[in-house]
Structure formats: C-alpha cells, structure tokens
Image (spheres, rainbow, N blue to C red):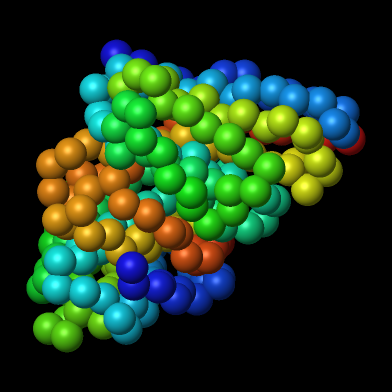
C-alpha cells in the first residue's frame, strides 16, 4: 500500500520546456490536491479535484493545467516553464468521511533555469 | 473558508511544553480544525484534529475554546526531533474536497 506516489522526485527544466508531474494514489480517495511550496514559504494550492472529471482552480493556478480522468491519477502539467515555477510540488489526497485529513506525497523538486 | 494566522516562529528547549496558537476569527459552524507537521524535504503529515473543547492523542493535545476563534496545539516535553513547521488548517466538515488553504505555518526550533 504505497499511499500517494509522486514522480519524478527531481527535475531540472529549461525555460519554455514543458513537463507533467505525476500523482497516483491507491487509497481510493475522491479528493486530490496540488500544492507548491517555495523555499522557506508555506503551501499554496494550485488545483484540486473532487472526483474523476472534475477539477477546480486554487490560489495560484496560472501556468498550470490538470486533468482527472481516473480516481487514481491527478497529473499536473506545466506548458511553458518559467523560473518562477521553481518550487517543490506536493500532491495530497483526502477521503470522503467528514473531516478526513490530507495525506501527502513526498513531493517533486522542480528547478527551472 | 476561515483564514488562519499563526506566529511565524517559536523557540523552545528540550523537555519543555510548547503551545502554538492559531487564530481563525471567521470560523464557520461546520468547520473543523486540523494540525499538520512538516519536516524539511517532506510533505506535511497529520498530527491532530478537533471541532471543539479538547482532543488528545499520543503525540499532542488540541485545545479549542468555546467561541472556536482560535485553537492551541500543545506538544508535551518536546525533543530535538520536534523541530519542524506546524500548520493549522480549517476545513468544512460538510463539504469535503473543498478549497483547502494553508496559512503560513509556525517554524518551531527545539534547542538542546
């Protein structure tokens, strides 16, 4: 039972390149989230999803896209990487029972140069 | 959703009790309060959760006054390994999967 798996762990991109950050869960939870965390700062919500086929914007969605075709997967897409997107990206899942806590993955550290 | 405010940083010594307070003045009736701990290079992990009064588990206690406009995370007898960032999060019990916004967190430094 892996919980929440994020790949890759590390990535260096050049400005203008694109990539997809993968997030997969085996907890069968409906709710999934993407956060970014800049060095020394708190977590900022990028996008979230309440179930397959449904996504919504968080606090800082610009420059990112998401899709949710299955319960298990919630990939985050960067189309034109910019240095401002250098950050650690965390995926989290949440169960449907009232007040279910968030379970986080181990993060993807992205550097854009 | 209720906005949360916490002290940016706190210092303590090993063996002391540490209390971290979070303000959430506009908390709604259906909102619950959850605290998370984050170590460097790791995702946050759940510590404790409550709705009102006091909750205790094996690692911490959570005190919530009657008006619920604040909450206090209490860590008994901290050790060096408790050095981390602590976040409080307010969420809607009846609307799971909502827009969960973290505050700035409190960086706790435990010294020997």
- Against B25, residue B61 (above or below) is above
Residue A7 image offset from top left, x and y in percent:
57, 19
- Against B22, residue A23 (above or below) is above
- Between B47 and B5, the one lying in front of the other is B5
At 72% from the left edge and 30% from the top edge, which residue is drawn? A79
Q: In this view, does A36 lie to the left or right of B66?
A: right
- Against A25, residue B63 (above or below) is below
- The residue most toward the front is A53
Mark yes or no: residue A3 visible: no
Image quarter for residue B94? bottom left
Residue B10 image offset from top left, x and y in percent:
52, 72
Residue B7 image offset from top left, x and y in percent:
50, 76
Image quarter for residue A41? bottom right
- Between A100 and B50, the one lying in front of the other is A100
Q: In this view, does A28 lie to the left or right of A40?
A: left
Mark yes or no: residue A90 visible: yes
Image quarter for residue A68? top left
At 54% from the left edge and 21% from the top edge, which residue is drawn? A22
- Between A105 and A32, the one lying in front of the other is A32
Q: In this view, does A60 lie to the left or right of B4?
A: right
């Amino acid at each position: 039972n892996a919980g929440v798996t994020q790949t890759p762990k590390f990535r260096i991109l050049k400005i203008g390149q694109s990539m997809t950050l993968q997030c997969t869960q085996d907890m069968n939870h409906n709710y999934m989230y993407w956060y970014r965390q800049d060095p020394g700062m708190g977590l900022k919500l990028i996008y979230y999803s309440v179930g397959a086929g449904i996504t919504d914007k968080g606090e800082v969605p610009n420059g990112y896209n998401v899709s949710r075709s299955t319960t298990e997967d919630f990939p985050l897409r960067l189309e034109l990487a910019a240095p401002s997107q250098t950050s650690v990206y965390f995926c989290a899942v949440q169960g449907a029972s009232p007040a279910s806590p968030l379970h986080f993955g181990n993060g993807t550290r992205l550097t854009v140069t | 959703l209720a906005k949360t405010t916490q002290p940016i940083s706190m210092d303590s010594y090993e063996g002391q009790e540490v209390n971290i307070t979070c303000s959430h003045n506009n908390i709604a009736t259906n909102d619950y309060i959850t605290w998370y701990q984050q170590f460097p290079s790791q995702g946050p992990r759940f510590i404790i959760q409550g709705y009102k009064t006091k909750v205790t588990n094996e690692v911490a206690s959570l005190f919530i006054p009657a008006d619920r406009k604040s909450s206090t995370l209490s860590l008994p007898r901290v050790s060096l390994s408790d050095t981390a960032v602590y976040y409080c999060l307010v969420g809607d019990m009846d609307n799971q999967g909502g827009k969960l916004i973290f505050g700035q967190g409190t960086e706790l430094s435990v010294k020997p």
